């Protein structure tokens, strides 16, 4: 039996797939410890896994509220982003995570499975102790945006990161794009068809498939007339108009809607007639029984909708959502609107067409079967198990090797960033 440390950060779409992979590893006889936010304690306990909280419920909600002002465009106010990290104690949290991993590391018997881009503590532990690490990307945007993110880590947050690295006797990172991909085992939690519908992941990354997160349990709803589900996910990085446009679109075409949102401050003061609000719902039971879903484009929501062949309309804005939406549309699985085209009429038109598409479920049946498959969980667990006993101190990559691995699109972005810094 090995000890599997699963380290992840974010909202449901970032955390719940790790819980599902952890449950698979536990069923194989391994000891599984999940390092993540305190808010997920109940979900982790329900899966029968051990939890090491990295924050408090209050701190997590405060961070979500604070982050939404910066995450949509972190380069607009670099000093504000650095202040946000310091205000929320995120550099101290990073140091604490490194210590947690070190404290639970047993040489030859421990593997860390960490979220790509935010799993810096795992990479530091690999440098310090030789801990074998698998990096897991939950959305293609984590690779698409890597040159930009590397610039943010280096030029916006570099001062704070440098302090933490020096505290552990490590050299500060200068090439973050190389550092954040400096492990052999990199897993992508999406299928090949989704990968091919946009900029593909780098060569060598294993496309496991969608991993549906363990969700809150609850009874299957029994509606005389299935409503339209409206959800903007569990986070707060969301456009202020999302719920208003979605709710008014439902009213426009005269359909009932179920609006699920645990952050009521985002929704209109008064909802239109026929729109019911709930703070949470068991999506695994709800999604197959709604007529359609209008959502923000989060990877967990779209995968859950695909698995139940539920028609989707995406009002996608910020971070990975437009990229996810374009991939779905190219695959013929959804329609979407960028924020510049958000109107009640346009959203209502897309929703009406989705509801009238009688051949939708039959047309996407192969994609639905793929999304609902448990094979992705098994593939991810297999690759994690393959690292047992693979301890070796991680060395920094040669920058020339990193440049050779970049895709043409990533080279173009990197060159543009360099020109911008020089004022060209």
Image (cartoon, helix red, strand yellow):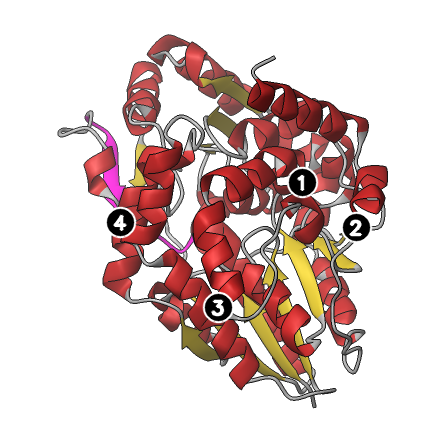
Q: Is residue 79 left or right of residue 163?
A: left
Q: Residues within 10 Å of mark 3 (few under 14, many from 20)?
A: few
Residue for point 70% across, 64% down: 134
Please identify, in this view, whether the residue under mark 1 or under mark 4 is nearer the observer: 1
Say if residue 267 shows up in the picture: yes
Locate the N terminus by quadrant. Answer: bottom right
Range drawn in magenta:
273-283
Point out which mark residue 143 bears: 1
Q: Residues within 10 Å of mark 1 (few under 14, many from 20)?
A: many
**In the figure, 122 relative to 85: above or below?**
below
Say which residue label 3 marks. 167
Quarter location, residue 266: top left
Query: Do labels 1 and 4 touch, CB within 8 Å?
Result: no
Say which residue label 4 marks. 279
**In the figure, 277 relative to 171: above or below?**
above
Please identify, in this view, whether the residue under mark 3 or under mark 2 is nearer the observer: 3
Residue 258 place in picture, x, y as percent = 32, 38
Point out which mark residue 205 bears: 2
Quarter location, residue 405: top right
Is 281 within the magenta? Answer: yes
Give how far apart the Cα atoms at labels 4 and 2 are: 37 Å
Give how far apart the Cα atoms at labels 3 and 2 are: 32 Å
Residue 72 place in picture, x, y as percent = 42, 31
Residue 117 place in picture, x, y as percent = 59, 50
Secondary element under disc 3, as helix, strand or loop, is: helix
Query: Do labels 1 and 2 touch, CB within 8 Å?
Result: yes
Please identify, in this view, whether the residue under mark 4 or under mark 2 is nearer the observer: 2
Quarter location, residue 373: bottom right
Decide which of tag 4 and tag 3 comes sooner along the chain.
3
Q: Residues within 10 Å of mark 4 (few under 14, many from 20)?
A: few
């Amino acid at each position: 039996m090995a000890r599997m440390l699963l380290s992840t950060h974010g909202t449901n779409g970032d955390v719940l797939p790790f819980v599902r992979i952890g449950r698979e590893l536990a069923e194989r006889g391994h000891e599984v410890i999940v390092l993540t936010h305190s808010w997920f304690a109940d979900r982790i306990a329900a899966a029968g896994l051990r939890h090491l909280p990295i924050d408090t419920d209050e701190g997590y909600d405060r961070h979500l509220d604070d982050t939404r002002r910066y995450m949509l465009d972190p380069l607009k106010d670099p000093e504000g982003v650095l202040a946000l990290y310091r205000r929320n104690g995120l550099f101290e949290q990073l140091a604490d995570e490194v210590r947690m991993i070190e404290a639970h590391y047993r040489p030859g018997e421990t593997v860390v499975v960490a979220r790509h881009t935010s799993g810096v503590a795992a990479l530091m532990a690999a440098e310090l102790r030789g801990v074998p690490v698998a990096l897991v990307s939950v959305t293609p945007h984590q690779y698409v945006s890597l040159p930009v993110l590397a610039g943010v880590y280096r030029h916006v947050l570099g001062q704070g990161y440098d302090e933490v690295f020096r505290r552990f006797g490590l050299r500060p990172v200068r090439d973050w794009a190389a550092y954040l991909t400096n492990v052999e085992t990199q897993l992508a939690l999406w299928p090949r068809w989704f990968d091919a519908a946009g900029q593909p992941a780098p060569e060598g990354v294993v496309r496991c498939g969608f991993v549906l997160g363990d969700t809150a349990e609850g009874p299957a709803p029994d509606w005389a007339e299935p409503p339209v589900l409206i959800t903007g996910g569990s986070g707060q990085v969301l456009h202020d108009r999302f719920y208003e446009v979605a709710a008014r679109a439902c009213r426009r075409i005269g359909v009932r809607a179920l609006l699920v949102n645990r952050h009521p401050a985002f929704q209109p003061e008064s909802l239109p007639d026929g729109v019911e609000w709930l703070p949470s719902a068991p999506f695994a039971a709800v999604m197959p029984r709604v007529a359609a879903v209008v959502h923000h484009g989060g990877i967990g929501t779209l995968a859950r909708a695909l698995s139940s062949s539920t028609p989707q309309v995406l009002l996608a804005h910020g971070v990975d959502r437009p990229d996810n939406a374009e991939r779905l549309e190219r695959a013929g699985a959804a329609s979407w609107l960028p924020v510049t085209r958000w109107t009640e009429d346009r959203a209502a038109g897309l929703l009406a067409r989705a509801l009238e598409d009688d051949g939708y479920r039959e047309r996407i049946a192969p994609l639905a079967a793929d999304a609902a498959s448990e094979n992705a969980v098994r593939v991810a667990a297999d690759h994690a198990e393959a690292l047992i006993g693979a301890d070796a101190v991680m060395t920094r990559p040669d920058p020339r090797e990193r440049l050779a691995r970049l895709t043409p699109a990533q080279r173009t972005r990197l060159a543009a960033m360099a020109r911008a810094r020089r004022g060209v």
